């Protein structure tokens, strides 16, 4: 006969609440619920490099690149060129502290090349003398235009680009910096550059650019003007307003000119952009020769004076371009523009007053400005906005309202909307950037 199994003692008596489980069982439950920690792994070094920065296999093909990545405290200027199997060449002496190197593009069958990237705006070697060169010759054909886009945006002007040639893209860029002036000599297949309002909002570049087409053909669109230019032509364009370049060049020199010294001698740049600069203007031939020589010289500390001479010659040529034409209408138009420049701070300035102070009728005034593609009041607003932008960039202003009232605006909201429409960002953004600029220097 089998005995009945003894019943397990209940945890609680009938009619009472369940008692708390013993501490031993509660701890066992918690241990079962707790996830098992994963073993910690040591951080991996850079691909192909050990923790000391030297290559495992000590391959002579990439030793220069590995050494450049390892020595970031004082890295020389690295120049992608046609020398060596990797297409990377280190300059003999470091010209300045360069940004971090990013290994992005493939050279031939190797997955190693580099591009020097920097924040948008002026070059990292501003106010110095140096030389840099870039080429797509050793870059894989599928990545050449992407490499070209990054190089030009990093060292010239940020913009959108598009390749217009069905054949593999080829391009080379040589940059020579002479103080505030930079000469970028470009040779490239047919492609397009388009700078729009969203680039202006992210980039603080307000320099003027002079294009000298030594052996190139191009089309430039800016300020509602389109011009087709060829070998030997000079043309001006402004980085703080949208433009579009379509070009195919064997030798195209792009000269970066600082705005401040030029605006001391010019009333406005809008009538001068996207216009052919005649070779008969005083100083035009000398300016071309100076650009051609500067593109071939070695940038040294003693050659900063070459940049200053180039600014003076450019100002002389642009003054002649603003005064080109000996008709009475041209003389009157220049006089009216100068009047608007001097009186733009007056909020009561009206069309009738402009006509009365310059002894012309309203009809003559309107027709004269219509020949240049705008109205007198639109020209006045453009001058006010340009002067307001220069004041905000200079700093020393407490509020946007102060800037608006100082330059003839009666409505702060209207001023802010017009400023954003013209430059792609609000005046308060530029005011905050001007306040923080001395702290970052």
Image (tube, rainbow, N blue to C red):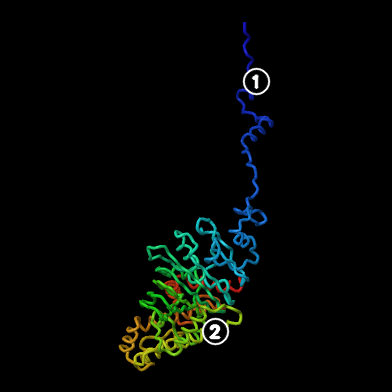
Q: Position of residue 404 (x, y in %)?
A: 48, 78
Residue of label 2: 308
* Residue drawn where x is 61% and y is 58% of the image: 60
Q: How many marks?
A: 2
Q: Is residue 56 found left or right of 214 in the rendered image?
A: right
Q: Secondary structure at mark 2?
A: helix
Q: Nearer the viewer, residue 113 or 332?
A: 113
Which label lies toward us, 2 or 1?
2
Regarding residue 402, the answer to whether it shows in the image is no
Q: Secondary structure at mark 1?
A: loop
Disc 1 residue crowd, few under 14, some 14–19, many 20+, Cα 10 Å: few
In the rendered image, the quadrant that contains the N terminus is top right
Vertical position of residue 88 compared to residue 314: above or below: above
Q: Nearer the viewer, residue 145 or 36?
A: 145
Regarding residue 269, the answer to whether it shows in the image is yes
* Residue 297 circle label: none
The answer to whether mark 2 and mark 1 are in CB contact below 8 A is no
Q: Nearer the viewer, residue 41 or 205?
A: 41
Looking at marks 2 and 1 on the same chain, the residue that comes earlier in the sequence is marked by 1
Q: CA distance from mark 2 to mark 1?
A: 101 Å
Q: Position of residue 139 (x, y in %)?
A: 49, 61
Residue of label 1: 9
Q: Position of residue 11 (x, y in %)?
A: 64, 24
């Amino acid at each position: 006969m089998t005995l009945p199994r003894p019943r397990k003692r209940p945890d609680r008596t009938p009619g009472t609440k369940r008692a708390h489980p013993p501490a031993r069982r509660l701890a066992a439950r918690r241990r079962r619920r707790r996830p098992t920690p994963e073993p910690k792994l040591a951080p991996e070094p850079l691909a192909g490099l050990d923790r000391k920065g030297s290559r495992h296999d000590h391959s002579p093909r990439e030793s220069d690149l590995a050494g450049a990545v390892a020595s970031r405290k004082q890295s020389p200027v690295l120049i992608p060129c046609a020398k060596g199997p990797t297409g990377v060449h280190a300059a003999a002496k470091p010209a300045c502290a360069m940004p971090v190197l990013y290994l992005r593009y493939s050279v031939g069958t190797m997955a190693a090349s580099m591009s020097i990237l920097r924040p948008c705006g002026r070059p990292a070697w501003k106010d110095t003398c140096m030389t840099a060169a870039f080429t797509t010759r050793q870059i894989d054909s599928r990545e050449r235009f992407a490499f070209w886009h990054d190089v030009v945006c990093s060292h010239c002007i940020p913009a959108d680009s598009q390749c217009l040639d069905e054949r593999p893209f080829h391009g080379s860029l040589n940059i020579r910096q002479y103080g505030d002036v930079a000469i970028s000599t470009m040779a490239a297949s047919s492609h397009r550059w388009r700078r729009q309002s969203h680039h202006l909002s992210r980039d603080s570049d307000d320099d003027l650019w002079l294009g000298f087409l030594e052996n190139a053909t191009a089309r430039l669109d800016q300020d509602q003007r389109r011009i087709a230019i060829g070998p030997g032509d000079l043309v001006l364009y402004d980085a703080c307003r949208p433009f579009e370049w379509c070009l195919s060049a064997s030798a195209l020199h792009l000269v970066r000119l600082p705005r401040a010294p030029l605006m001391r001698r010019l009333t406005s740049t809008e009538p001068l952009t996207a216009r052919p600069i005649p070779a008969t203007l005083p100083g035009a031939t000398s300016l071309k020769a100076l650009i051609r020589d500067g593109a071939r010289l070695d940038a040294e500390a003693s050659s900063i004076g070459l940049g200053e001479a180039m600014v003076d010659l450019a100002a002389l040529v642009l003054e002649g371009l603003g005064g080109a034409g000996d008709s009475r209408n041209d003389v009157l138009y220049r006089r009216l523009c100068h009047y608007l420049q001097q009186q733009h701070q007056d909020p009561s300035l009206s069309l009738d007053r402009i006509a009365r102070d310059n002894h012309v009728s309203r009809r003559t005034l309107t027709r004269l400005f219509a020949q240049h593609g705008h109205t007198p009041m639109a020209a006045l607003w453009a001058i006010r906005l340009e002067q307001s932008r220069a004041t905000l960039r200079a700093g020393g202003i407490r509020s946007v309202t102060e800037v608006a009232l100082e330059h003839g605006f009666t409505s702060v909201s209207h001023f802010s909307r017009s400023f954003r429409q013209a430059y792609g960002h609000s005046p308060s953004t530029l005011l905050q950037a001007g306040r923080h600029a001395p702290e970052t220097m």
